[in-house]
Image: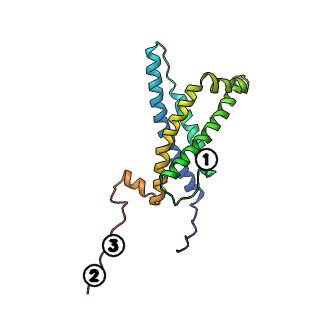
Amino acid sequence: MAAKPPSVKPPLRQRAINELKEIGVLTGYLFIVFGAINVMKAAVLHAEGIELVHWGAGFVKALLLAKFIMLGKTLKIGEHNRARALIWPTLRKAFAFLVFLVVLTVVEEAVVGLVHHRSIGDSMNDFLGRRLAESLSGMLILLLVLIPYFAFQVLAEALGEGRLVRMFLVDRNAAAPQPARPAERS
């Protein structure tokens, strides 16, 4: 088996641009999901005579979770054996990131509580007590959002640099390997 050539890191400027693009796409993806959840919550509450729309909070939450996911990717959370079927690294990453994001969300709730002059115990009691059903359903939804995200990532990695994106957004055939031409006879 031939040795894999050492990977060359792109320049810092290019890495920063790539990370900004990735965080933008991820934030957009999460904002669409949280937006749909906000629409559903608003519709349910509207039926009960309560008006509620928190679009800014959904965007901030999407941006924060996107940055947390980028941090987790930097820390290589969920990375392991790449030789297995793609479902396993997809699920491993989705569950690992779910745990990572839940821990960071608990920390976030504690900090928000402190900013509002509440004890950490009161914040955790609210998050894990009174709102436990809401917290658990949010975690389940987040898992269901992470699975396709990481499935796309794992598949893109398996296909090679930029190939899946080209197949999705440009032309499916443009990214396909070209068939070998038969040798010409002289």
Q: Which mark is residue 184?
A: 2
**Whole-percent x, y for residue 80 in the image:** 58, 56
Q: Residue furthest top?
A: 49
- Quarter containing the C terminus: bottom left
Neighbor class of circle 2 (other Cα within 10 Å; few <14, some 14-19, many 20+) is few
For residue 186, above or below residue 100: below
Spatial separation of the CA atoms under disc 2 and disc 3: 12 Å
Q: Which residue is mark 3?
A: 180
**For the residues bearing labels 2 and 3, Cβ distance under 8 angstroms:** no
The structure residue drawn at horizontal position 59% and vertical position 45%, both measured from the top left corner, is: 96
Spatial separation of the CA atoms under disc 3 and disc 1: 40 Å
The structure residue drawn at horizontal position 65% and vertical position 30%, both measured from the top left corner, is: 109
Q: Amino acid at mark 3?
A: Ala
First along the sequence among labels 3 and 1: 1
SS state under label 2: loop
**Whole-percent x, y for residue 69 in the image:** 58, 44
Q: Which residue is mark 1?
A: 72
**Whole-percent x, y for residue 32 in the image:** 45, 35
SS state under label 1: helix
